Amino acid sequence: MRPELLYPLFQPITSLKGVGGRVAPLIEKLAGPKVVDVLWHLPTGVIDRRHRPKVAEAVPGRIATLVLTVDEHRPPPPASRAPYRIAASDETGTLTLVFFRASRDYMMKLLPIGEQRAVSGRIEYYNDLPQMAHPDHVAPVSELAEIQTVEPVHPLTQGLTPKTLRKVVESALAAGLKVAEQTPEWLDPSVLERHGWPAWGEALRAAHHPEDEDALSLHSPARQRLAYDELLATQLALIVVRAKMRERPGRARVGDGSLRDTALAALPFDLTGAQRRALDDIAADMAKPARMLRLLQGDVGSGKTVVAWLAMLGALEAGAQAALMAPTEILARQHWTTLAPLAEAAGVRLALLTGRDKGAAREETLADLAEGRIQVLVGTHALFQADVTFRDLGLVVIDEQHRFGVDQRLGLSAKGRDADVLVMTATPIPRTLTLTMYGDMDVSCLDEKPPGRQPIETVLLSSQRLPEVVDALRRAIGGGNKVYWVCPLVEDSETLDLAAAESRYEDLRARFGGRVGLVHGRMKPAEKDSVMARFSGEGVDILVATTVIEVGVDVPAATVMVIEHAERFGLAQLHQLRGRIGRGSGKSSCLLMYQGPLGDIARERLKVIRETEDGFRIAEEDLRLRGAGEVLGTRQSGLPDFRLADLEAHADLLAMASDDAKLIVARDPDLEDERGRALRVLLYLFERDAAVRTLRSG
């Protein structure tokens, strides 16, 4: 249960003053649905209203706060579109206040003739005379001190005024500061002292009320403190979950090598040094009585599947079963197709289970699995379902694990109370992000390409050269090669993605007839599989696709990849897509078509992808160019979205949080001492509840 003292922060935003039916959806879109979300919505700029000149000293272009006497109203003639002007002065001169579409009654009330008012806004000169258009503040002189401050500027959304948002933020901050008064300190006093960081409540207040531009910096003490809290919560959650998984009794699994030797003899190639090292790591982990939790990172085509297969055979030799889980049905079938001949050669019974399997066939698979007759099961998240039981699940392999939530991952490993877990990813992850996504998981890297993999020629072409590209396709398919044509990514719109793909499909079909196929995310799995089967085999030579082909599809005859509007794709995505070709013995080409003019980042991104095929270099560059928020954006990773931490600016804090979390769990594994209880509040504050649930359930 969330601690009671945090309840006010997890109320809906409608509990805040000034958030009614019209404003609530706008605030939710901008920050989120809860009070705490508004608390994390920090300012990105400041307006300094402390400058208080006389009219004669007013500098054009600068924000100023002045005290003026209202001299004269000059409303525009009826039906005129001219502005409403008001002359106001001090002892040094006159300033014109300008308002567009203003009503006379309202203006008379706001600025009565003969009275003094404090006004604040940007000074301009028009016909050599000072003026202020639409002042940001007009108030009685008694409120001068409230206006003459440094005003935070928060990011806005359409329909929301700065004034409304500021009121809502202040209301959320008041709730936060009230909670802070009762909250125990979760950071070690020596850490606060060493870095000169304020207490949590003070850090919140300072972050929302920056005194100047320096206070906005990600390296200011308040911002560092808040970022560290968030990073510590994330690292602690990962390490608690992992420590509890390791605590559960594991089982030493040592095979006699017979199945692996048979499998190696049947492979038409030798393993790379990197593959051998990874297998040694995995075998050593599985031989220990603790549960294995290892990450296998390997670039597209580095041979992860073979490593996973040999690891699964190790589990089988020790008398256990193994499961391989993929995020999509198309990828699960791909794995099954790849492993089926290897399983046959080793005399192993392999089965596939996806959401599509129903009725008697499914019942038979489940019965054979429960009895242990099926030794290796490949599937999608259908493997989590309650009726899927193993006789003795010894090893779980999770492919592209960043596409699964933490709860799903825990769900599958719970199918075997002492199952070892091997996680695979084809997305090379920079060191900083490995920590963020996987805590201190053991990592094996496949950083060598298997022999025989062809280099891919990558060419940049302006979209104006489309007719030449289409002509080149005719030559490619005439020579027995196959072509991927990937359509542009339209930000946040699957409908527009699909429209782009369908339009290109029709164009190419007019030229090449039935040899063109189309796959996209809205197709039923059976339709998608049917088109993919014809592309892998006979019938389809040009496959038009949205990015659904990004992961795992293996067609050795595909030697050409055309990516339209390549400037819209992230580096990692371009690299993944390019990895779909170059899998056979033929020379392969990737054509990146772009629409000019290119921005600086897009140009740099395309330059990197043209220069290198090294996934790890590409990942580091991607992080540098886009920043971690986007590389780890929830849209593509299902990861915690960082609201306060910036993984580039705070990389040193991430490493520190990781070390601190390990030390905390080593000293107080159940978070039961005084600081441990305070840290539980921190976990709930940043919604890392899965870790607290793990502590409870042990």
Image (cartoon, rainbow, N blue to C red):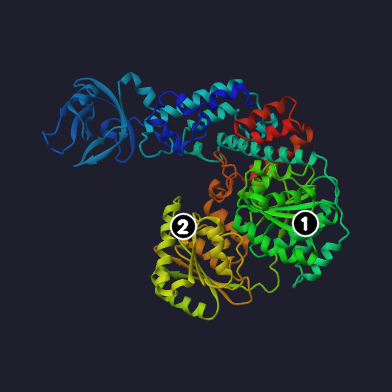
Q: Nearer the viewer, residue 646 or 246?
A: 246
Question: In the rendered view of the protein, which quadrant contains the C terminus?
Answer: top right
Instruction: Measuring from the top left, give residue 520's x and y in whole percent.
Output: 49, 58
- Please state which of the two labelled residues, at mark 1 or mark 2, is closer to the viewer: 1
Instruction: Measuring from the top left, give residue 442's x and y in whole percent.
Output: 75, 50
Q: Please, is residue 20 above or below residue 328 in the view?
A: above
Q: Please, is residue 694 above or below residue 389 in the view?
A: above
The amino acid sitting under disc 1 is Met
The answer to whether residue 201 shows anywhere in this view is yes
Left or right: 580, with 371 as reference point = left
Q: Nearer the viewer, residue 345 or 83?
A: 345
Q: Residues within 10 Å of mark 1 (few under 14, many from 20)?
A: many
Distance (Cα) linking label 1 and label 2:
37 Å
Query: Helix, strand or loop at disc 2?
Result: loop
Q: Residues within 10 Å of mark 2 (few under 14, many from 20)?
A: many
The answer to whether residue 458 shows anywhere in this view is no
Disc number for residue 622: none
Q: Please, is residue 510 above or below residue 442 in the view?
A: below
State the residue position of label 2.
Answer: 489
> What residue sits 61% from the left and 37% below the top?
230
The amino acid sitting under disc 2 is Leu
Question: In the rendered view of the protein, which quadrant contains the N terminus?
Answer: top right
Instruction: Please tell me in which quadrant of the rendered image residue 585 appears.
Output: bottom right
Instruction: Measuring from the top left, give residue 586's x and y in whole percent.
Output: 60, 77
Instruction: Measuring from the top left, give residue 26's x and y in whole percent.
Output: 41, 35
Query: Helix, strand or loop at disc 1?
Result: helix
> What residue sits 64% from the left and 57% below the top?
332
State the residue position of label 1.
Answer: 312
Sequence-wise, the earlier of marks 1 and 2 is 1
